Image (tube, grey):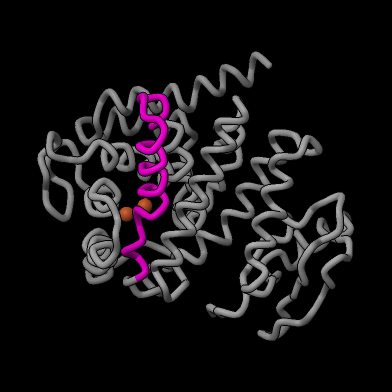
Amino acid sequence: MYDKDFFHIQIRSLSSKDSIPFDVYIKINDKKVHYLKAGDKFDDNKIIQFQTKASESFFIRAEDKLTYKSFIQKKLSSDDFSSHEKAQILRDSSMSLIEELFESPTVEDALKGSQQVIDNFMNFMDDDPDAVSQLVKLSSHDFYTYNHSLDVGIYSLGLGRILGFSGDELQELGEGALIHDIGKRQVHVDIITKDGPLDELEWLQMRKHPQYGLQILNDFDVSNAIKACCFEHHENMMGTGYPQKLPGSEIHPFARIIAITDTYDALTTQRTYNVPMTPEEALNFMKGKLKGKYDEDFLEAMYSVLFKLKAKEKAS
Ligand SMILES: [Fe+2]
Ligand SMILES: [Fe+2]
């Protein structure tokens, strides 16, 4: 249940050599119980214990969000953490903002949150040559809207950068990728979380999420490119996609990128009723069985995003 007075955090993001500068609460039987006073230290062993038992239950007060943000920034710019640890901290702290994207009643706050997440990712990518590979390694392969959004955001930043986008454009692509499924806010939660294939009526609802997304964004000052990420990511190059059956040449390049990263994430993700494909299998499937649906040059570049990283891993 969304609670505007509290902000859900990932326990792992609290790992620190210093004391924690805000109070921490733990949810027990739907009540937030005061757990840690600002100024106390959180023992790393305890974090590991909680990580396995009650990782979903930690909160801070909403008014401490800024303090939490600078606590995270400080960790990201410190030399105490490896690039792998920083990627993990970034992912864990972003997850809270992504949750808001789907749960917060005020879309405006959620949109600001998505800008912040991409800002953090871009800074990390600028500072650390291994950033993309570290972030891709942490992909959750877990089909949960929040993880999915984050993974599509990360893959799209990687693919966009290889395709030559940078600066404000890359930022816009990242934000669009992060919120590409924002229209799912309007689809019933039972359909979103259903453990199994959807029936026809449920599909009809689900397939409306690009329109819902556009409707949501039309009320805000959002660029056309970001709107296209939401509205056009289920179009395909053969002109048989939805909702508009746009011919390939009319699909926004960002939506063509997200069509690839979105399908790739779905194919490599564990759901209750499927066996996830390996990265190679997924891309070969898209190139073979789904031939013609994706921008061929972009799909080819996706191989470099994923396998150049692999080659680099092997070499190191
Ligand atoms: Fe979608
Ligand atoms: Fe999606």
**Looking at the image, is 148 positioned above or below residue 215?**
above
Asked whether, in this view, residue 37 is left or right of residue 276, the answer is right
Instruction: Give x and y (percent) for residue 313.
Output: 63, 21
**Looking at the image, is 238 positioned above or below residue 26?**
above
Identify the magenta region. 160-185
The quadrant in which the N terminus is found is bottom right
111 or 274: nearer the eye? 111
Instruction: Give x and y (percent) for residue 303.
Output: 42, 24
The quadrant in which residue 179 appears is bottom left
Instruction: Give x and y (percent) for residue 65.
Output: 63, 66
Asked whether, in this view, residue 265 is left or right of residue 292, the answer is right
Tell me which image quadrant ligand 1 sits in. Answer: bottom left
Any magenta on residue 172?
Answer: yes
Residue drawn at 11 percent across, 41 percent down:
239
Task: Tell me, yes or no, if residue 207 can be seen here.
Answer: no
Asked whether, in this view, residue 236 is left or right of residue 82, the answer is left
Task: Tell me, yes or no, if residue 264 can be seen here.
Answer: yes
**Looking at the image, is 121 positioned above or below residue 220?**
above
Instruction: Give x and y (percent) for residue 187.
Output: 32, 71
Q: Main secondary structure of the magenta part?
A: helix
Residue drawn at 26 percent across, 53 percent down:
227
The quadrant in which the C terminus is found is top right
71 or 239: nearer the eye? 71
Residue drawn at 16 percent across, 55 percent down:
243
278 or 216: nearer the eye? 216
Any magenta on residue 169?
Answer: yes
The quadrant in which residue 48 appears is bottom right
